């Protein structure tokens, strides 16, 4: 599902290398945790995979047939993200001016999913993340855990093949974090999607199928 | 994608209702002002053309004298009428007469009933049943319905017509049914008019309709080439063009001023959209991460601009129509320029101009949204998602690069100011004015950093230091907040400077052109001989009397006629009476000399010292141009000739105006002496102080619309500051919450924000004042001479300018109280807890 080869990236301001010659794969349906010290380049690697940052060298093949996102222009990268990638962030990033249902519906609009399917898919996912009846509510009235559930629903609603999650439980208390993690993993597995989860949490990492550790020497 | 755009635009309008509505209203105001001015002028021009058509019909050509005192000899009329290409040649004699006590002279038109039926149906008389006057051929007069209403007489009544000291009585035979509702006209048989008023053996003009198979252009060219120099051939198109030219520069100027309101509206959209983009930078970044194409980030902001501009412009059209209706009902069709009568013209909205103003409103809004849209496109997604809006495109610019844009714009503006007017309009100067405004806005960040960056390093209390640092370190926000104020204050200051320069110049000019204590005017009608003779008697209480007569010369049929002033002045010392702008040249002894006004110099490109051929007194007279004098009364040019020269050329000097110097101590007696003459002949007597007062009050009235537009621009500018400051509170919510957590109480936060408002407003006003002086100089030295042919020295009314700046600063501080209030309403704990 995801194959990275020869990835290299230098720090923009300091001229030190963040990583060099990284290579790894995430198989279809596989959930992989990416761990490492703060500042080691985990988020940068995730951004490179999502086409939000460009590596100094290497290739990142996504999907089947594989497309090298590094070689794509900005508009094509955006189209690939809209079609094939779902995101979950530590800071939730739920749009406060849209209702919960509208927030979840945004990827459907971007991926060009027929309008007739929007309501049913949104409702199914709201139920799936434990928020039935929350569609018309505004994000301001939701708790952190509920916001992250909305974000998970948004990441999955357009049925992407790859989920990228950056510290998805970092802003939550341990109990809520546990619930949200379970939910995320269940829904990803249910959709048979692949996932790469950046985390500092040992518990989260151990819940994944495989752990990749980013060190100054490379991936272990 | 359309659904997403609709969601986001709706959400944006919901969350920023006040700012969006203000921007919309600003666009509406600009469009409304521009559109209403267009509608009023259009209606006044249409009214003018209609009145002209009533009197003149729709001839293929008109042959007339260039000199208003001249005429077309009858043999030429016969020759034209006998031309096989001519279907109808209608001779007309037109003069101005007074009726009994009516103070304003009316037009008396002598027509030939048979040719008028074919050429000028609007002038055809209708006999009243009970009048029994024998009809037009028996010497009856026919009055337009408006005139009948004015004099309160009906058909069958007898009228006394006055011209000079001659009187004639005639009976009203009926009315002129096709005359316009406001036309004051008298029609009589051409032979009757000629017998009583002249000219003998000639007519005022001949209106020609050509046979259908003739070649109008060829015929006109042939006849024009054969005409003596004292006559001209003009076409209906010349008349419309002349009517339009009469007020064209004034109309364009008013429209440009209305566009100023629109421009300020565009800056308000700019401020609103930039703060909206900054406020939602994480949202746009999120959408980008989720797959929103980059061009959509640009288009969404532009669409929001359009969503402000379109309803704003539509509202503006409705408001503009209502404003035009209200204005014409209250004040008639004249916007203060004095070019049209104060009649109520019919306002008729038309699709094309309405669409034009609609597009203009949308374009202004889109222009305002363009830079914020560009910045939104350029925001780095990951950084914006994590840290919000970054103003890096501005911040990283070196000082040299920051200076480059204003310096290049200044060079371009300087170049534009060297260009001559285009089609008689100062379009390049208007473009230079727009560039000066851009220079001001572009230079704001640099000035902000320079002034407040240094000030922030001083030892100051925490509140002041925070305010200074915020302004210095966020130059882009300061630029946005100050831009509306820069533009509106610059334009207002420039108008104040221009109007003040003009007023001071007019004041000085009046000193020079009103040397006598008393004036008597015959309103372009010759003064009665009886009065002139009485004035020469030893018992008349006057030390000195100077007489003058007026006529007009048509030098170019497409331009309004030039005034010819025949005055009793010494040709060796004209400077004693005329305010010359340069040297007065001594004319060759045997050559008549004229002194031309600045307008005439500009329009006809005449220079002192040259000789000039004038269509004067039925001939082609060579005159010497002895100098240029300042004239603020006649925009289309005037020339003065001494009475002696005029009479030497064979002119019949029939004075219509007098300047009178009463004997010392006999001022009251002089007024009493003149009163019965004035009453008997409906003459106007005025003291120079009264004329000065009236002139200045007309001057002030003519700029009333200008002041209204500038006031609107100022209000919009202050709103812009308030909107941006309020938005900036939300942008800096985390920073303000941190300050609160560190010990800033609500009062300190409020003070810091109000101080920021005052600092930004000060920068805006400072730059606005500098730009205002520059624009004032352009208006005074370039726009006025090019558009109106008026020159004047620059006068800076510092008291008014500084007073305006202080008042605006106070308004801006008051406006920033709203922002300060918002800051104290921030849910601080929530903001600190949130990582968004």
Image: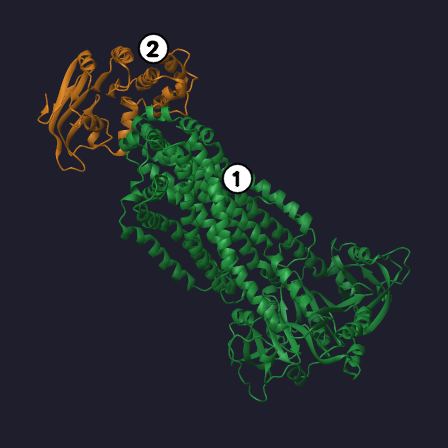
Chain colours: A orange, B green
Any part of residue B73 in sight: yes
The residue that disc 1 covers is B25
In this rendered view, identify the residue nearer to me: B468 or B682.
Answer: B468
Chain to which the residue tagged by mark 2 belongs: A
Question: In terms of image quadrants, where is residue B296?
Answer: top left
B197 on left or right of B426: right
Residue farthest to the left, as pictured: A217
Instruction: Decide: is A100 above or below B13.
Output: above
In this rendered view, identify the residue nearer to me: B787 or B192.
Answer: B787
Question: In terms of image quadrants, where is residue B462?
Answer: top left
Q: Quadrant of the C terminus of chain A?
A: top left
Q: Position of residue B417 (x, y in %)?
A: 42, 62
Q: Residues within 10 Å of mark 1 (few under 14, many from 20)?
A: many
Instruction: Decide: is B76 above or below B132.
Output: below
Q: Position of residue B69 (x, y in %)?
A: 69, 74
Q: Are marks 2 and 1 in contact (CB under 8 Å)?
A: no
- Kindly indicate whether the residues beneath marks 2 and 1 are on one polypeptide chain: no
A95 on left or right of B34: left
Any part of residue B362 in sight: no
Instruction: Decide: is B721 above or below B178.
Output: above
In this rendered view, identify the residue nearer to me: B537 or A25.
Answer: B537
- Where disc 1 sits, the SS reads helix
In this rendered view, identify the residue nearer to me: A97 or B476.
Answer: B476
Q: Quadrant of the N terminus of chain A?
A: top left
B428 on left or right of B630: left
Chain to which the residue tagged by mark 1 belongs: B
Q: Residues within 10 Å of mark 2 (few under 14, many from 20)?
A: some
Identity of the residue drawn at 81% across and 78% down: B530
Q: Position of residue A21 (x, y in %)?
A: 10, 29
Q: How many marks?
A: 2
- Where disc 2 sits, the SS reads helix
The residue that disc 2 covers is A128
């Amino acid at each position: 599902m995801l194959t990275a080869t020869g990835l290299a990236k230098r720090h923009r301001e300091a001229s030190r290398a963040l990583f060099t010659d990284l290579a790894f794969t995430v198989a279809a349906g596989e959930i992989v945790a990416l761990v490492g010290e703060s500042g080691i380049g985990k988020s940068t690697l995730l951004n490179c995979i999502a086409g939000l940052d460009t590596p100094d060298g290497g290739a990142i093949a996504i999907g089947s047939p594989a497309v090298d996102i590094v070689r794509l222009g900005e508009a094509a990268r955006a189209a690939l993200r809209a079609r094939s990638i779902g995101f979950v962030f530590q800071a939730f990033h739920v749009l406060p001016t849209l209702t919960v249902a509208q927030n979840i519906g945004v990827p459907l609009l971007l991926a060009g999913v027929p309008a007739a399917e929007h309501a049913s898919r949104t409702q199914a996912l709201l139920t799936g993340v434990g928020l039935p009846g929350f569609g018309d509510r505004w994000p301001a009235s939701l708790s952190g855990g509920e916001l992250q559930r909305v974000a998970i629903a948004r990441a999955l609603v357009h049925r992407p093949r790859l989920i990228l999650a950056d510290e998805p439980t970092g802003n939550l208390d341990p109990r809520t974090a546990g619930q949200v993690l379970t939910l995320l993993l269940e829904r990803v597995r249910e959709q048979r999607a692949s996932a790469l989860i950046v985390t500092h949490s040992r518990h989260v990492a151990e819940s994944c199928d495989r752990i990749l550790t980013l060190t100054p020497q490379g991936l272990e | 994608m359309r659904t997403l755009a609709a969601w986001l635009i709706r959400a944006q309008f919901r969350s920023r209702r006040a700012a969006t509505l203000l921007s919309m209203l600003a666009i509406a105001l600009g469009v409304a002002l521009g559109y209403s001015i267009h509608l009023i002028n259009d209606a006044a021009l249409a009214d003018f053309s209609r009145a002209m058509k009533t009197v003149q019909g729709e001839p293929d050509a008109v042959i007339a004298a260039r000199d208003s005192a001249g005429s077309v000899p009858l043999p030429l009329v016969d020759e034209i009428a006998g031309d096989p290409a001519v279907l109808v040649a209608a001779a007309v004699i037109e003069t101005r007469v007074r009726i009994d006590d009516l103070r304003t002279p009316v037009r008396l038109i002598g027509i030939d009933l048979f040719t008028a039926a074919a050429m000028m149906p609007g002038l055809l008389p209708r006999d009243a049943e009970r009048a029994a006057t024998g009809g037009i051929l028996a010497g009856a007069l026919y009055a337009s319905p408006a005139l009948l209403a004015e004099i309160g007489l009906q058909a069958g009544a007898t009228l006394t017509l006055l011209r000079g000291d001659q009187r004639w009585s005639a009976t009203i035979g009926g009315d002129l049914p096709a005359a316009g509702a406001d036309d004051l006209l008298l029609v009589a048989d051409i032979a009757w008019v000629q017998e009583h008023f002249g000219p003998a053996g000639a007519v005022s003009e001949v209106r020609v309709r050509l046979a259908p198979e003739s070649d109008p252009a060829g015929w006109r060219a042939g006849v024009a080439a054969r005409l003596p120099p004292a006559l001209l051939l003009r076409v209906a198109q010349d008349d419309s063009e002349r009517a339009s030219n009469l007020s064209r520069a004034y109309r364009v100027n008013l429209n440009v001023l209305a566009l100023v309101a629109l421009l300020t509206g565009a800056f308000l959209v700019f401020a609103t959209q930039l703060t909206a983009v900054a406020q939602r930078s994480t949202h746009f970044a999120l959408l980008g991460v989720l797959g929103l194409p980059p061009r959509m980030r640009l288009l969404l902001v532009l669409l929001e601009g359009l969503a402000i501009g379109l309803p704003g412009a539509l509202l503006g059209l409705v408001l503009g129509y209502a404003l035009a209706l209200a204005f014409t009902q209250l004040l008639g069709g004249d916007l203060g320029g004095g070019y049209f009568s104060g009649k109520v013209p019919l306002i008729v909205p038309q699709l094309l101009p309405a669409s034009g103003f609609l597009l203009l409103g949308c374009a202004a809004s889109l222009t305002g949204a363009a830079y914020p849209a560009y910045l939104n496109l350029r925001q780095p997604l990951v950084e914006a998602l994590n840290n919000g809006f970054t103003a890096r495109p501005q911040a990283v610019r070196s000082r040299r690069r920051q200076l480059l844009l204003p310096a290049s714009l200044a060079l371009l503006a300087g170049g534009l100011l060297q260009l001559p007017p285009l089609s008689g309009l100062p379009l390049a100067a208007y473009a230079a004015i727009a560039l000066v405004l851009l220079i001001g806005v572009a230079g704001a960040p640099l000035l902000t950093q320079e002034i407040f960056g240094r000030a922030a390093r001083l030892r100051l209390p925490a509140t002041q230091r925070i305010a200074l640092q915020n302004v210095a370190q966020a130059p882009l926000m300061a630029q946005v907040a100050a831009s509306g104020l820069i533009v509106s204050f610059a334009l207002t200051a420039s108008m104040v400077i221009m109007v003040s320069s003009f007023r001071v110049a007019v004041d000085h000019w009046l000193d020079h052109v009103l040397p006598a204590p008393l004036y008597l005017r015959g309103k372009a009608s010759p003064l009665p001989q009886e009065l002139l003779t009485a004035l020469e008697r030893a018992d008349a209480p006057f030390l000195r009397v100077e007489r003058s007569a007026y006529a007009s010369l048509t030098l170019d049929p497409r331009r309004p006629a030039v005034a010819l002033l025949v005055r009793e002045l010494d040709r060796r010392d004209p400077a004693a009476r005329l305010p010359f702008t340069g040297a007065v040249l001594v004319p060759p002894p045997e050559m008549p000399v004229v002194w031309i006004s600045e307008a005439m110099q500009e329009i006809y490109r005449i220079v002192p010292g040259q000789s000039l051929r004038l269509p004067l007194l039925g001939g082609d007279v060579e005159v010497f141009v002895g100098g240029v004098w300042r004239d603020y009364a006649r925009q289309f040019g005037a020339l003065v000739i001494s009475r002696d020269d005029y009479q030497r050329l064979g002119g019949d000097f029939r004075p219509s105006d007098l300047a009178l110097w009463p004997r010392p101590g006999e001022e009251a007696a002089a007024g009493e002496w003149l009163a019965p003459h004035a009453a008997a002949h409906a003459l106007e007597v005025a003291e120079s102080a009264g004329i000065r007062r009236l002139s200045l009050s007309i001057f002030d009235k003519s700029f009333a619309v200008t002041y209204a537009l500038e006031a609107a621009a100022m209000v919009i500018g202050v709103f812009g500051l308030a909107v941006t400051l309020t938005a900036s509170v939300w942008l800096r919510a985390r920073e303000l919450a941190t300050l609160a957590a560190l010990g800033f109480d609500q009062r300190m936060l409020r003070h810091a924000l109000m101080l920021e408002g005052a600092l930004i407003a000060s920068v805006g006003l400072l730059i606005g004042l500098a730009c205002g002086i520059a624009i004032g100089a352009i208006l005074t030295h370039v726009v006025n001479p090019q558009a109106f042919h008026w020159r004047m020295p620059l006068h800076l009314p510092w008291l008014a300018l500084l007073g305006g700046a202080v008042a605006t600063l106070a308004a801006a501080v008051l406006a920033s109280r709203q922002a300060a209030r918002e800051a104290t309403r921030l849910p601080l704990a929530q903001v600190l807890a949130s990582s968004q």
